[in-house]
Image (cartoon, helix red, strand yellow):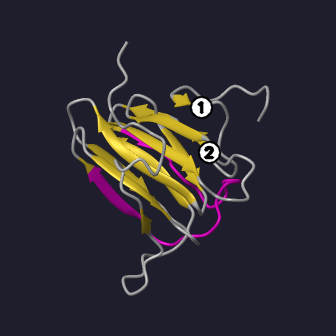
Amino acid sequence: MAGTTLPRGVKAKRLIDGVSVKELRLIPDERGYLMEMLRSDDEIFQEFGQVYLSVAYPGVVKGWHYHKEQTDFFTIVKGMMKVVLYDDRPDSPTRGEINEFFMGELNPMLITIPPGVLHGMKAIGNAPGFLVNCPTRAYNYDEPDEFRVDPHDGTVPYDWGLEEG
């Protein structure tokens, strides 16, 4: 990753190991527009688990959590969100790194979040953010592969407040 330019809307020194960004393209015509998010012939595609929508109200933090088995593929289809990743994996070469992604209607992208990477999101602006995830595993209601960390207790060295200036 050294020497490469990060995509617009990404605030990080370098991408966390295993994280990737696919910049998305809108294809407009007189009827509206189409935006492909993830295709089975994409280099980053792994396997299909399910597709779901998660909506965050403005200013609300949804996170932190991580998965032990599942890879997430996030895109924001309506509004704008700040999606933040934190690498706390003990053997990772990017342990301690934080990546911020400012993504949505004004900056369409799909990010790959590997197992073990803590992640959360917050709608930015004055409208809800609509996140679509296409994870590699279906949600198991009896034994969820989801492990939560309080977003405000200091476990993760990140401040969800607005950075002004």
Tell me the element at label 1. loop
Q: Can residue 79 be seen in this snapshot? A: no
Relative height, residue 134 to residue 139 (above, below): above
Location of residue 39 by image quarter: bottom right
Name which residue lies at 33% across and 32% down: 161
Residue 45 shown left or right of residue 25 in the figure: right
Counting from the top left corner in percent of width and height, residue 52 is at 37, 63
Q: Quadrant of the N terminus?
A: top right
Q: Who is closer to the viewer here, 57 or 147?
A: 147
Task: Using residue 107 as the reference point, say whether residue 78 is left or right of it.
Answer: left
| 76, 121: nearer the viewer | 121
Mark 1 — residue? 12
Quadrant that contains the C terminus: top left
Q: Sequence-wise, which precedes: disc 1 or disc 2?
A: 1
Query: What residue is drawn where x is 47% and y is 43%?
Result: 84
Q: Which residue is mark 2?
A: 96
Magenta extent: 33-55
Q: CA distance from mark 1 to mark 2?
A: 12 Å
In the depicted view, which residue is nearer to us: 87 or 15?
87
Residue at 45% x, 47% y is: 75
State the image coordinates of residue 73 (x, y, percent, origin top left): 52, 55
For marks 1 and 2, give the one nearer the viewer.
Answer: 2
Query: What kind of residue is marked 2?
Result: Gly
